[in-house]
Image (spheres, rainbow, N blue to C red):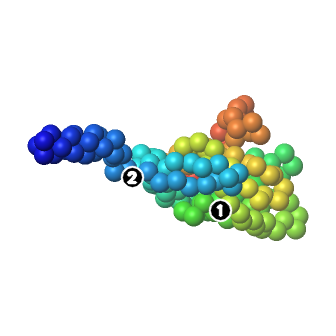
Amino acid sequence: MNSIRFFILCFVFGLSACNRPEASTESTSTDSAGTMKFITDSNMTSAAIESNQATNRSIKAKGVYRGVFPCPDCAGIVTEIRINKNDTYNISSQYLGKKDSKMEMNEGNFIWINDSTIQLDGMKNSPGVKYCLTDTAMRQLDINGNRILGELGSRYTLTKN
């Protein structure tokens, strides 16, 4: 009789162990709308990879880009853009051949539109200017984010120093 009780007791403990949840690395957080979200290792890994890619992208883009943009009523616009690794920029420009032309300076933040395109925010005269970045240059894009074509299209390029 005792052996039957012992067997039943072992059987019950065995079944309860099968229902025990596995150790999980999930945690929860609540967003601003009060919705509970589950965060798993794969979410954290994905976020870490994206953060690392963004950092690498910013480091790669970092540098000083110089050139002369076309100007309809002057000899050109000497432009220098400094891209900083903390997603900020400094820009200076001066109109060539214009009387009393002064160096115009601006700074602000930029955002990544995709892996090779940034948008400069905080520009006084040209809000939302977009540039396509390569290893050696940055090229200004039109208002829709497309490459500027035509006779002067290639002159909208700044070379990385």
22 horizontally vs 99: left or right: left
Quadrant of the image occupied by residue 132 = top right
Residue at 77% of width from left, 40% of height from top? 143
Q: Residue 89 bears which disc, if any?
A: 1
SS at mark 1 in the image: strand
Residue nearest the observer in this picture, 24 or 64: 24
Residue nearest the observer in this picture, 30 or 6: 6
Q: Which mark's residue is nearer the viewer, 1 or 2?
A: 2
138 horizontally vs 10: left or right: right
Q: Where is residue 25 in the image (x, y as percent from the top left)?
A: 39, 52
Residue nearest the observer in this picture, 20 or 41: 20
SS at mark 2 in the image: loop
Which residue is the site of mark 2?
A: 25
Quadrant of the image occupied by residue 12 = top left
Residue that lies at the very extreme toward the top in this rendered image:
150
98 horizontally vs 4: left or right: right
Q: Position of residue 88 (x, y in %)?
A: 64, 63
Q: Earlier in the sequence, mark 1 or mark 2?
A: 2
Q: Position of residue 57 (x, y in %)?
A: 50, 52
What residue type is disc 1 on? Tyr
Q: In which quarter of the image is the N terminus?
A: top left
